Amino acid sequence: MIKRFINLLGSVQVIVPLLIVITVVSLAGVIVPQSLPTAQYLQIMPGWRSSIILQLGLDHIFSTWWFYTLLGILAVNVVACSLTHQVKSLKNAGAMRFLQKPDDANRLKCSVSFEVDGAQINAVETITGFMKRRMFFCSNQTKENVTQIAARSPRLKEIGSLMFHLSILFFYVGGIVSTMGGFSYVKELCSGDVVGVQNWPYRIRCDGFKVERNQDGAVSSYKSNLTVLSADSTQLLKKVVEVNHPLAFAGVNFYQNSYGEQSGSFEVASLQVFGPQFDTSGYMTAASLNTPVTLPGNGITLTVSRFISDFIIDMQSGEATSRSDRPNNPAVKVTLTRGADTLYSGWAFENYPDVHQESKKDYKVVFVGYEPRYYTGIKISHNPGNPFIWFGFAFMTLGIFLVFYFPHRNYWIFIGQGNNRKVIVTVGGASSRSASAFQAEFNHSCDSLKRVLKEGSSS
Amino acid sequence: MNIFAQNSIEFTFFWWAFIAYSASCLLYVAYFPISKKWLATSASIAMAIGLLMQTLAMIERTVHIHHMPLTNMFEYISLFAWFATCFYFVFLRVYKLHLLGAVISFTVFMLMVAGSLLPKDAEMQLVPALQSYWLQIHVSVASLGEAAFLVAFAANILYFLKTGMSKTSAFASRLPDAQTLDRIAYKAITVGYPLFTIGALFAGAIWAEQAWGSFWSWDPKEVGSLIVWLIYSAYLHARFVKGWTGSRAAILSTTAFTCTLLTFFANLILGGLHAYG
C-alpha cells in the first residue's frame, strides 16, 4: 500500500492532474476575495457560502496547510520524476544506437547516397573528424566490409528538461527557507528615529523623508535617507532609499514601502491673524508646533500648542481628539499672549475658517494651511531563501531554452568500398525537430560532407 | 460623433489603424467563403497599413509622454495587438496560410475594439513603482509571449474547423491537414512559452522583489499568469510525455489562451497590485 503510494507520488501520470488541481485551487483564490475580515464574508455571502469559505480556509487559500501540501506533493513528484524518468531518459539518450543496414538509413525521411573517390578507411576518418568538429559524439562499427558511423548531438534537450524540473525544487526550497528563517514587516519611521532589527547586529536611522511632486501636484517620488549604524553608533552606510531602489546590508533589505502624515504633528502651519493692530487683510505668519512666534507691534506672541488631523470633540468631557489618522478635519490650537495676558485661545479649523471665531472679541486666527510632517513606511525583509530562487530562475530559463531550441540530431553514415576506387556513402538523419525543419540542416550538412570528402580525396 | 475630434495626431493614427484592421477583418470574412487570392492579398495590405499606423500612434504617444506607453490597459492592449500583427506577418511568411491570418486578424480587430472603448489618457507622470527599466522588460516580453499564444489559438480554431467539418467540405479542403495545424499551434507555443515565462513571471517577480520586497504576492494578475503558465506547462508535458496531439492538445491550448485573456483583464475586475489603469 505504502509502496503503491510512493510509486504514485513519483509517477509521471500524476503531474498533469496535479497541475490541474493546483490551477483550479489558484482560480478559486482569484475569484474568492482574500484576507478580508470575517464579518465582511458574512455580509457579502450570507449563509452556507460564507461558512464553506471560512471552514475550508478559502479566504486565505494561499497560506492554508492544504495548499502548501499540494505544492509539496508537486515538488516531491517533480523531484521523483527527475531522478527516475529524467535521469533514465538522459542515460538512454546517451547510448549510441546503430542501424542494421544502409537500407535502414535510406528509409529515413532525411537520407542521401553518393559516391566519392578514395579509400574507405580514409573516408571513415574524414567523416568522423567532420562530425566531431560539429560537436557530435561518434561511434563506429564494421559489418560485412561496410563501416557505419553513428553520430549524435549532445543530449542538451534532456539536460534542459532535468534543469527545468529541478528549478521547481529550487523555488520550493527558497520559499520554505525564507518562510522558516526570514522575516518581513513594515516599520513606520519619523525623521531621527533609530530602530533595531531582530537578531541583526546593526541599527537603522532615518535621517529624513521627502515627497517630491511635479508641477501638477502628482507624486513623482518619495525618498528616505537611511543610515546603517553599528552597535557603537558608527555610521556604516548611508543611502537614499526609494521605490525600486532598496538598501541592502548584511542580508537585510530595506524597501521604501509607503508614507503617510504623522498624526498630531506638522512641519509648518500658515496662519492669518486679525486684530486691532493689523489692517483688514490681517497678518500672515508661519508657525511650528510649540514654537512661539512674535508678531509685529505690542509684543504679541503666537503659539500653536496642538494639532489634530481629524478633529472631533467629546461632547461630554469636552476633550478634543482625532477621529482618524487621515487629514479629514485639520485643526490647530492657537494662543495669542502679551506678557502674562492671554488675548486669544482657541481652535482654528482649516476646512471651517469661521467656526469658533465669533466668540473671540478682538482677535481672530484663520488656519490657512499646513505642510504635513510625514512618516516613512520602510519594509524590512530578510529572505535567506532568495539565492535558491535566483538559482531557480537561472535553471528554468536555461532549461527551457535547451528543451525547445536544442533538439536531438542523429546521423547514421554507412561507408562501403565501391568499384574503381569509389567510396559509397549513405547518410540517414533523424531529429526531434519536424522532418521539414531538419531537412534544411541535413542537406547543408551532407553538402559540406561531400565537399570535405572530395577535398580529402584530391589531396 | 467625429472620431478624429480629439485633435491629436496620435489618436488620428490610432483610428486609421483601427479602420485598416477592420478592413482587413472584413476582407478576410469575404475570403472565408470566396477563395479569391486578391481578397487575401488586400487583407494583408490592410494589415500592413494598420501596423504602420499603429506604430506611428505608439511612437507619437512615446514622444508625447516621454516614456514607453505600457502603463495602462489601453497602452497594453495596443502593444498586444501590435505584437500579434507582427506575428501575423511572420507566420504568414513561414506557413503562407491566409486562413490562419484571418483568425489572427479578427482577434487583432477585437483587441482594437476593446482598446477603443478604454480610457486613453496618457500619464505623463509615472507612479514611483513604475519608474523602473523592468517595466519595459516585463510588459513587452510578456505581451510578446501572449501574442505568440494568440497565433497558437488561431491555429487551434482552424484545427477545430478542420476536424469538425466533413472532409468533402470545400472550406475544409482549403485548410492544411490537421497535423500541420497542430504543429503550427505547438510551434507558436514553443515561441510563446519561454517569452511568457521570462517576461510575465520571472521579470515580474524580479521587479516585484526590487520594488515591494517580495518575489510573489498572490495578486490576482500574478495568480492568473501562474494559471496560464500551469496550463501551457500541462500542454507541453502532456505532449512530451503522453504524446498528446490533436483534439486534446488543442482543447488544453485553447483553455490556456482563454485564461490568458481573462488574466489580461483581471486587474480591471479584481484590482490588486497591477491595477494601474
Image (spheres, rainbow, N blue to C red):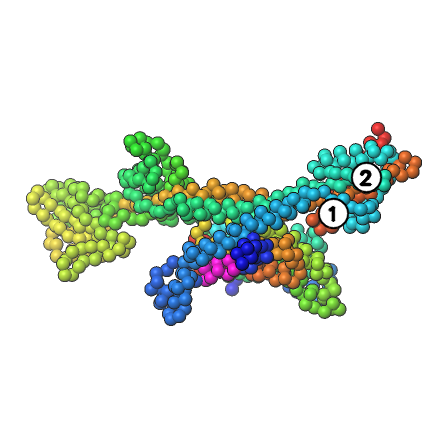
Give A445 or A221, whichever is nearer the viewer.
A445
Instruction: Using the image, tell me which numbered label, if any, was put on residue A275.
Output: none
Give A258 or B234, whichever is nearer the viewer.
B234
Within the image, what quadrant is residue A204 found in? Answer: top left
Q: Does the magenta stretch include residue A25?
A: yes
Same chain for the residues under marks 1 and 2 in the image: yes
Give the structural element (helix, strand or loop) at label 1: strand
Q: Is residue A67 magenta?
A: no
For badge 2, the amino acid type reads Thr
Write the start and end of the magenta stretch as one range.
Answer: A21-31
Spot the residue most to the left. A340
Q: Mark 2 points at which residue?
A: A142
| Label 1 – label 2 distance at C-alpha | 21 Å
Discs 1/2, front: 2
Give the structural element (helix, strand or loop) at label 2: strand
Q: Are marks 1 and 2 in contact (CB under 8 Å)?
A: no
For badge 1, the amino acid type reads Ala
Instruction: Using the image, tell me which numbered label, if any, was put on residue A430.
Output: 1
**Does residue A103 appear to the left or right of A183 in the view shown?**
right
Q: Mark 2 lies on which chain?
A: A
**Does residue B8 appear to the left or right of A40 in the view shown?**
right
Image location (x, y in percent) of residue A9: 54, 55
Within the image, what quadrant is residue A133 found in? Answer: top right
Q: Visible in this render: residue A110?
A: yes
